[in-house]
Amino acid sequence: MVKGTEVHEVSHKYALGLILALGGGYLDAYTYIARGGVFANAQTGNIVLLGLSLASMEWIRAVCYIFPIIAFMAGIIICEVVKRNVAKGIVHWKQYIVLLEMITIAVVTFMPKGKVGGINCDMIANIMISFVCSLQVQSFRKIRGIVCATTMCTGNLRSATESLTLFMSSKEKKHLHNAGKFFGIVLFFVLGAVISSFLTNMFSEKSAIFVLLVLGIAFAVMFFKATPHKDGATDAQ
């Protein structure tokens, strides 16, 4: 290997990060439009609402907010179990995670809206999407040497602004490149939300099926070998 050259794991390819961010934005808009006006990707809102419910002693409502939090935690645990137990081969362990995401989304696609027989299908769908997002955020944490998330934007926006500020003070191009990467992830997240707005308004809860196409592309991209580059970044498995 040439000195200073790092071979990145294929799952850290920037194009893959953009694809996953597209799917992340799509799902966040989908749950808001079709599944009860909630954002299921991140758990900050659920934790705050859990606290408010406990403060007002609304125990049943509090339990409802606990379930997506537990589902999110379960996704993290499953990622770590798969990572440690799947042998290296043609199929990468992260591809198994993407397949699990696809199976879960397929179930959500054919889950009816609203309540059926007293069961709140939207709540169950949102819990399942929280699970999917935890799988993704835990499995794909590093892209081209930068730590970022493909299911939420707050951290990416912070990092993009920080990198831009560092470039303005130091004039080092690496900071500008990093800012561009972060802003790119945010842009594709927004693009996913825009696409979701059109498709979800057309196909309602069934529009989740389009995420399967995005995840299918992500799964296929990981079969391509990583290529070396000289940006000096290193990635953890």
Image: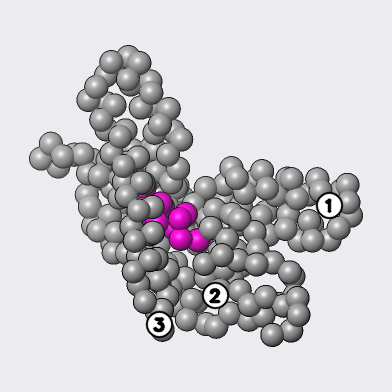
In the image: residue 219, left or right of residue 14: left
- Residue assigned mark 1: 167
Mark positioned earlier in the residue sequence (3 or 2): 2
Query: Which quadrant holds residue 178?
Result: bottom right
Q: Estimate the x, y position of residue 119 in percent, counting from the top left.
A: 16, 39
As drawn, the label of residue 10 is 2
Q: Residues within 10 Å of mark 1 (few under 14, many from 20)?
A: some
Q: The residue under label 3 is which amino acid type?
A: Gly
| Colour pattern of the rendering | one colour
Q: Nearer the viewer, residue 113 or 53?
A: 53
For discs 3 and 1, the disc positioned in front in the rendered view:
3
Which residue is drawn at the image coordinates 27% and 26% (left, top)?
Answer: 61
Residue at 60 percent of width and 45 percent of height: 155
Give above or below for 52 relative to 152.
Answer: above
Q: Is residue 199 above or below residue 41?
A: below
Residue at 61% x, 55% y: name it. Answer: 147
Tell whether label 2 touches label 3 (CB within 8 Å).
Answer: no
Question: Residue 23 placed where, x, y %?
Answer: 47, 59
Mark identifier at residue 89: 3
Q: Nearer the viewer, residue 111 or 226?
A: 226
- Cα separation, mark 3 vs mark 1, equals 40 Å
Evaluate if marks 3 and 1 touch, with contact meaning CB atoms under 8 Å apart: no
N-term mark: 1 or 2:
2
Secondary structure category for the residue under label 1? helix
Distance of mark 1 from mark 2, alpha carbons? 28 Å
| Magenta-colored stretch includes residue 58 | no
Read off the magenta span: 130-140
Position of residue 33 relative to residue 198, above or below, is above
Q: Is residue 213 visible?
A: no
